[in-house]
C-alpha cells in the first residue's frame, strides 16, 4: 500500500515542480540537452539577404527548341536582379560579421536580420573568393551578441557540434552532429586553397555562412558547403576553420580591402606511395617541393626541389593546401618552423612569412577602344600579380590578366604569356602595346601556355 500511495502522490504533483529546468553546470549535465547552449549562441547567428545586379543575355530564339541551341547566347545583355539567401555570424559587439563570399560577393544591397528580428544594412569590408569568406560591418550597430573564436588546433574528430543557420529560408534552425574529419581539401570546390573541417551535422542551402559551434559555445568554423547528389544534406558538410576567420578579421580591422596571404613562391605535390618509394622515404606523407621561385622565403633558407615538407610548427603537412593553410593562419610578419626531409635526413628551417613583392613593377596596361584588342589587360609577371590573379608560378614575361571581349575570339586566354607579336620579342607591357598599335592587316601572336608555345593569327 505504501508503494501505491507514493506513486499516486507523484502523479498529482504540479507540472512545473516535476519539470523544472536549470542551466547545466558541468560537461556531463550539458550533454543531456543542447537548449542552454543554443540560447547562448543563437542570438549571434543572423540571416543575410543579399541583392546584386547581373547582366544576362536574352535571346529572341530562347523559346524555340531548334534555334535555341544555335543562338542561345547572342541576345542583348540586360540587367537582372539576383537575390541570395544565407547566414552569418557576429564576431564582435561593434558589428563585425563573417559570412561566405558566395552569399554576399558583388552584392549591391545587403540586409541582415538578427535572431530578435532587428534589421541592419551591412557593407563588405574584405572578401576573398578563393577562401569563400567575407567580413562585413553592420551599420550603426553596437552592443551586439557575438561568438568567440575557437583555436582550430584544439578541435578533434568525434567532438559534438551544432550547426546554426537558415536552411531553405525557413528561419533559424539548429542541427547536431560530430566532427567527422579534419584537414579536408579539394573535395568541396576542387580549389587547392580549400581546407575544411568535416561534420555530419546537417547543412543545407541557406546554411552557408552560418555557425558550427562546439560544446563550449565558441565558433569552430563557418559552414560553407556539402557533398550531395540530391541537393540535400547527406551527412557530409564542410566548414572553414575559425583560425582562418581570425586572419580575415585582423586584416579587415587593419583596413585591408583585399585578403593577403604570405608568399609561398613554391609548388608541391602530395607524397603518395609511389613517390615515397622513388624518394626512398619510409612511408607516404608530406609535401614534395616541385618548384621554387628565386628569392622566395623558402628558397632563401635553402629549401629546394626534391625536399619533402612533413610538418609546420609541429603540425603534420600532407598536401599543398595544408601548407598554404598553415602559412595563411600564421599571417604575414610571422615566422614558422618548417620540418623537411632531405636525403632521408630530417631538418628544421625558420621561414619568414612575407607578402608577395611587386618586383619587377607590374606596369599594368589596358588597351582602349581604338586599340586592336580592346579591353585586353597585361602586366609584367611578379609574385604580387600571380597571387592577386591566382595564377600558377610563371617565369618572367608579360602575362594576360584580362582578355576583354575581343581577345577570346582569337584564342587568347587569361594567364597566357605573350612572347612575340608579329615577330617582335615582348619584354614589357609597353612592347606589346606598341606592337599591337603598329599592327597591319594580319597579326600573329606567339604565347606560352602550360609550358607550350602556341601560335595565334587573326586579321584586322
Image (cartoon, rainbow, N blue to C red):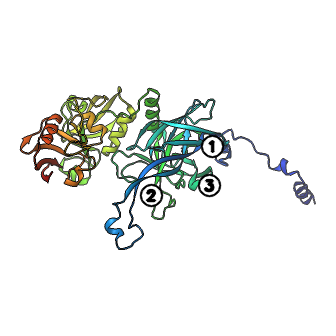
425 vs 49, left or right, is: left
Q: Circle 2 sits in a helix, a strand or a loop, which is it?
A: loop
Q: Circle 1 sits in a helix, a strand or a loop, which is it?
A: helix
Instruction: Report how far apart the C-alphas of labels 2 and 3 lie in the structure.
Output: 21 Å
Q: Nearer the viewer, residue 449 or 335?
A: 449
Confirm whether residue 343 shows in the render.
no
Q: Quadrant of the N terminus?
A: bottom right
Confirm whether residue 221 shows in the render.
yes
Image location (x, y in percent) of residue 143? 63, 30
Q: Nearer the viewer, residue 453 or 435?
A: 435
- Residue, disc 1: 42
- Residue contact between numbered discs 2 and 3, judged by CB atoms under 8 Å: no
Instruction: Report how far apart the C-alphas of labels 1 and 3 lie in the structure.
Output: 15 Å
443 vs 231, left or right, is: left
Please give the name of the residue rendered at 40% of the width and 35% of the height, measured from the top-left corner. Answer: 329
For mark 1, does the 10 Å Cα neighbourhood hold few (<14), some (14 to 19), or many (20 or more) residues? Answer: many
Please give the name of the residue rendered at 22% of the width and 31% of the height, measured from the top-left corner. Answer: 363
- Residue, disc 3: 170
- Residue, disc 2: 227
Please give the name of the residue rendered at 76% of the width and 45% of the height, measured from the top-left corner. Answer: 21
Q: Nearer the viewer, residue 194 or 180?
A: 194
Image location (x, y in percent) of residue 372? 19, 45
- Earlier in the chain: of badge 1 and badge 2, it is 1
- Earlier in the chain: of badge 2 and badge 3, it is 3
Amino acid at each position: 500500500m505504501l508503494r501505491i500511495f507514493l506513486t499516486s502522490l507523484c502523479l498529482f504533483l504540479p507540472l512545473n515542480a516535476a519539470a523544472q529546468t536549470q542551466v547545466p553546470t558541468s560537461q556531463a549535465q550539458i550533454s543531456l540537452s543542447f537548449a542552454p547552449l543554443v540560447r547562448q549562441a543563437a542570438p549571434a547567428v543572423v540571416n543575410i539577404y543579399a541583392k546584386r545586379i547581373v547582366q544576362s543575355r536574352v535571346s529572341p530564339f530562347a523559346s524555340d527548341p531548334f534555334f535555341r541551341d544555335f543562338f542561345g547566347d547572342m541576345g542583348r545583355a540586360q540587367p537582372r536582379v539576383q537575390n541570395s539567401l544565407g547566414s552569418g555570424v557576429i564576431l564582435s559587439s561593434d558589428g563585425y560579421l563573417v559570412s561566405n563570399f558566395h552569399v554576399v560577393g558583388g552584392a549591391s544591397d545587403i540586409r541582415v536580420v538578427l535572431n530578435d528580428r532587428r534589421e541592419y544594412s551591412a557593407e563588405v569590408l574584405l572578401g576573398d573568393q578563393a577562401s569563400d569568406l567575407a567580413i562585413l560591418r553592420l551599420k550603426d550597430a553596437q552592443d551586439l551578441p557575438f561568438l568567440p573564436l575557437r583555436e582550430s588546433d584544439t578541435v578533434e574528430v568525434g567532438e559534438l557540434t551544432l550547426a546554426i543557420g537558415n536552411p531553405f529560408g525557413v528561419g533559424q534552425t539548429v542541427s547536431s552532429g560530430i566532427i567527422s574529419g579534419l584537414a579536408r581539401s579539394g573535395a568541396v570546390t576542387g580549389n587547392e586553397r580549400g581546407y575544411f573541417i568535416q561534420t555530419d551535422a546537417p547543412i543545407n542551402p541557406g546554411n552557408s555562412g552560418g555557425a558550427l559551434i562546439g560544446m563550449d559555445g565558441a565558433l569552430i568554423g563557418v559552414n560553407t558547403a556539402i557533398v550531395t547528389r540530391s541537393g540535400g544534406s547527406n551527412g557530409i558538410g564542410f566548414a572553414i576553420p575559425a583560425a582562418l576567420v581570425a586572419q580575415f578579421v585582423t586584416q579587415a580591422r587593419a583596413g585591408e580591402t583585399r585578403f593577403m596571404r604570405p608568399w609561398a613562391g613554391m609548388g608541391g605535390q602530395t607524397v603518395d606511395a609511389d613517390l615515397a618509394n622513388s624518394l626512398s622515404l619510409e612511408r607516404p606523407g608530406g609535401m614534395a617541393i616541385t618548384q621554387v621561385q628565386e628569392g622566395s622565403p623558402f628558397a632563401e633558407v635553402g629549401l629546394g626541389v626534391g625536399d619533402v615538407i612533413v610538418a609546420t610548427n609541429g603540425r603534420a603537412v600532407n598536401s599543398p593546401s595544408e601548407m598554404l593553410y598553415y602559412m595563411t593562419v600564421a599571417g604575414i610578419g610571422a615566422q614558422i618552423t618548417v620540418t623537411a626531409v632531405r636525403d632521408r635526413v630530417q631538418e628544421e628551417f625558420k621561414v619568414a612569412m612575407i607578402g608577395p613583392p611587386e618586383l619587377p613593377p607590374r606596369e599594368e596596361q589596358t588597351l582602349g577602344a581604338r586599340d586592336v584588342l580592346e579591353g585586353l589587360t597585361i602586366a609584367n609577371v611578379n609574385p604580387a600579380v600571380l597571387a592577386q590573379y591566382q595564377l600558377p608560378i610563371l617565369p618572367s614575361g608579360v602575362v594576360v590578366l584580362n582578355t576583354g571581349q575581343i581577345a577570346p575570339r582569337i584564342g587568347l586566354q587569361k594567364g597566357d604569356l605573350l612572347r612575340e607579336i608579329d615577330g617582335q620579342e615582348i619584354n614589357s607591357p609597353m612592347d606589346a602595346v606598341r606592337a599591337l598599335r603598329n599592327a597591319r592587316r594580319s597579326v600573329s601572336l606567339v604565347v606560352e601556355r602550360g609550358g607550350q608555345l602556341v601560335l595565334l593569327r587573326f586579321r584586322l
